[in-house]
Each structure stands twice: as C-alpha cells, then as structure tokens.
Amino acid sequence: MSIVTIRNVEFLNNPARFLDPYHFRVTFECIAPLPEDLEWRLIYVSSPGNEELDQELDDCLVGPVPVGVNSFEFEGSPPSPDKIPPEDVLGVAALILTGSYKDQEFVRVGYYQNTEYDNEEMNEAQPEPIRFDRLVRDINQKPRVTRFQIKWDVSPQRPGQVVAAGAVTSAAVPSANDIDMAEATDVNGASS
C-alpha cells in the first residue's frame, strides 16, 4: 500500500516555447504523516535508447508532509540544447516526474512531449542549424503512471488509534503446529 498517491499533475504553461521553463502543480494525497521529505525530480529523455543523454532538469524536496491532500508548484529548467543529438530534437521525447521517499522511488509519471517549429514553413523545410528560439513543445495530457512498492516506515492512522512505525508490515505468523497436515498442498497445488 502506498502512503502517497498522486491525484493530479497540471502543466501551467502548456504548450510553451521549447526554451521556457516547465511550470506545473502536483497534487497528492498522503494517508500518514511523513517526517522525512519527499523528493521530486523532473527528467527529460530525448533518446530512449541512450540513458546517458537523459537530463535531470530540476528536483525539489517537499516535507515534512502532513496527512491529507497536499499540493506544490514546481518549476524546472528547460533541457540543455547542446546535450540533445540534432536528430532527436524534433518530434517526440519523454518528460518524467519521479517521486521518492528516503531514496526509494515510489512513483514515475511519464508524458510524451512533441517538439516542432512554430510555423508550417519551418516544419516543412527545417533550417540548419536548428533554431531553438523558434521551437514549441506540447506535452500530452495522458500520462503513463508506474508505481513501486517501497518501505515507508510509517502507518496510516485510524481515528483514535496510535500506530507504531513499522506496524504496517507486522502480522501474526502461524507456527508449524497451526497447519492441518490433512489440508496441506504441495507447490503444484495438489493436496496431500
């Protein structure tokens, strides 16, 4: 179970010029107080086959985080043009927002970004060299969200109940004496 769930990511300047900063608002729900910061990172992926070309545009720390719905605005630098191979500038790239707690990534939200010139003539007869000042980006509003199970070290609180850290992973463990041998099954599901 995740302690933090993203409710919405709203890009506040989309579409925008390629060289403009990214500006967006993240809204998330937290079901237990987090004493440590959440780390959010924004990554630009121009060449999916070459991770070395990924650019971390910015990161921010949010916390400590109270129970409830929380939001913050995040501004990330645009990608550095000199780190993008010329053949990967125009067309589709990926923009990834990651959330981590105690160096454990718990969510990855990926968006497709389309980059093209701001007029049809330049899109048809692309200038050499690339004119970054004339490029516009448009981020698709349908993200791909990947969630990861991590160790949160906190538990959701129930009304009137005090919960110790780590209790969410505790459970009664049956002993061998509790197992009815007449109903035991082997790993293939056959009864013995």
Image: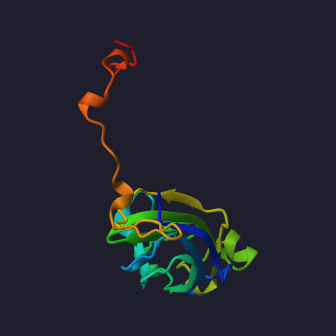
Q: Can residue 137 be seen here?
A: no
Tell me the quarter of the picture where residue 21 sits: bottom right
Tell me the quarter of the picture where residue 166 sits: bottom left
Which residue is farthest right? Answer: 120
The C terminus: image quadrant: top left
Vertical arrangement, residue 139 with respect to residue 59, above or below: above
Residue occupying image coordinates x 39% and y 14%: 190
Vertical arrangement, residue 185 with respect to residue 110, above or below: above
Is 153 in front, or is 96? 153
Tell me the quarter of the picture where residue 60 sits: bottom left
Is 85 in front, or is 15? 15
Which residue is farthest left? Answer: 176
Q: Position of residue 63 (x, y in %)?
A: 43, 84
Which residue is farthest top? Answer: 192
Left-right relation of 26 to 166 = right
Is 85 in front, or is 162? 162
Left-right relation of 50 to 25 = left
Q: Position of residue 10 (x, y in %)?
A: 65, 77
Q: Can residue 190 be seen here?
A: yes
Vertical arrangement, residue 2 with respect to residue 64, above or below: above
Residue occupying image coordinates x 58% and y 77%: 26
Q: Position of residue 37 (x, y in %)?
A: 39, 80
